[in-house]
Amino acid sequence: MMPWFKRVDKGIHTPTEEKKETPDGLWYKCPECKTVTSMAEHRKNLNTCVKCDYHDRIGSKEYFAILFDNNKFTELDENLTSGDPLNFVDTKPYPQRIAATQKNTGLKDAVRTAYGKINGQEITIACMDFAFIGGSMGSVVGEKIARAIDHARKTRTPFLMISKSGGARMMEAGFSLMQMAKTSAKLALLSEEGLPYISLLTDPTTGGVTASFAMLGDFNIAEPGALIGFAGPRVIKETIGRDLPKGFQSAEFVLEHGFLDFIVDRKELKQRLTDLLAMVMPTEEENGNKKQVRKTTEKVS
């Protein structure tokens, strides 16, 4: 009687079409500690490593699901798309690049804005998507953020900005840089209304975004390990001619040097924001007093 483990025929080959391989996307390998876990477990842990807590990049879809109660929200200006004011062409015309990116990502541009409730507190949120041309800031990004701030002012809700960007969009040149001034001016109006602005900086937040709305929060907070800076480390090193400190431009480094208020783990984000808003949101009585003061001022003028 022949043992079951002995191979009778040699040189057996399985046709390619009959081979059974593990489907892609079932496992996640942490780029930091190399721990392997299932994608289901990774998503359950809000796209953070179960061992070292490395925070993977996620987009507006995931942030909205994390923050809005029961993932229910109303999106603002969802169909706003970029024009081509400069007739810009690199390896392909700008309109073709926009169309291709929209098709590949399912996004209209590099930011989505929406309002809903976070643990019962109404809030307006703008969230950037790095998947759309590196989260670059173009005219649509600036306009949607400006309109979201106007919505927050109109509805008397706090405003949360989740930044994730490589900076200004070169295909729009000066039009892109104008968004720095526009969004900053809108935030000044929000401040005059006495409404809180929380800026969450995620990996990476760089360039013109850092130089404008990302750093103008009443509270500037960040996720662990996020890259935060204006110019890249290589450019800075070549400019100053010196080696940079360890951890330069990480969220922890930026916090240590006074540019952040605190760092928050993604798994604690919703509750930390709720606690923060409970402390700073004006009461109905305070809102009523401000309206009365505004009416009196208008009469005097």
Image (cartoon, rainbow, N blue to C red):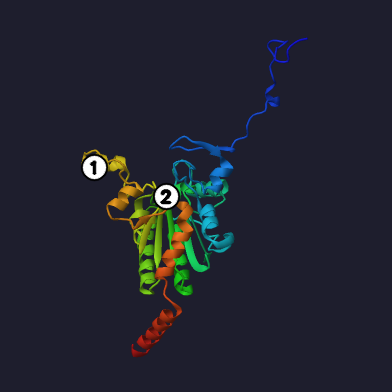
Which type of secondary structure does the marked residue at label 1 adopt? helix
Q: What residue is drawn where x is 36% and y is 56%? A: 262
Q: Where is residue 156 drawn, in percent x and y? A: 46, 73
- Quarter of the figure that contains the N terminus: top right
Residue carrying label 2 = 171
Q: Quadrant of residue 183?
A: bottom left
Picture quarter with the C terminus: bottom left
Q: Is residue 174 visible?
A: no
The answer for how far apart the CA atoms under marks 1 and 2 are is 26 Å
Residue 105 position (above or below residue 220): above
Taking 122 as reference, is 229 left or right? left
- Between disc 1 and disc 2, the foreground one is 1
Amino acid type at circle 2 is Met
133 left or right of 10?
left
Above or below: residue 180 compared with residue 51: below
- The disc placed on residue 223 is none
Percent across and percent down for residue 150 are 45, 70
Residue 255 visible in rendering: yes
Q: In terms of secondary structure, where does tag 2 sit?
A: helix
Q: Compared with residue 170, is residue 286 higher up or lower down, i.e. above or below?
A: below
Mark closest to the chain's N terminus, 1 or 2: 2
Marks counted in the figure total 2
Q: Which residue is mark 1?
A: 239
Counting other residues with Cα less than 10 Å from the Cα at mark 2, is it few (<14), some (14-19), or many (20 or more)?
A: some
- Residue type at the position of mark 1: Thr
Question: What residue sits 38% from the left and 83% below the top?
Answer: 294
Q: Nearer the viewer, residue 146 or 31?
A: 31
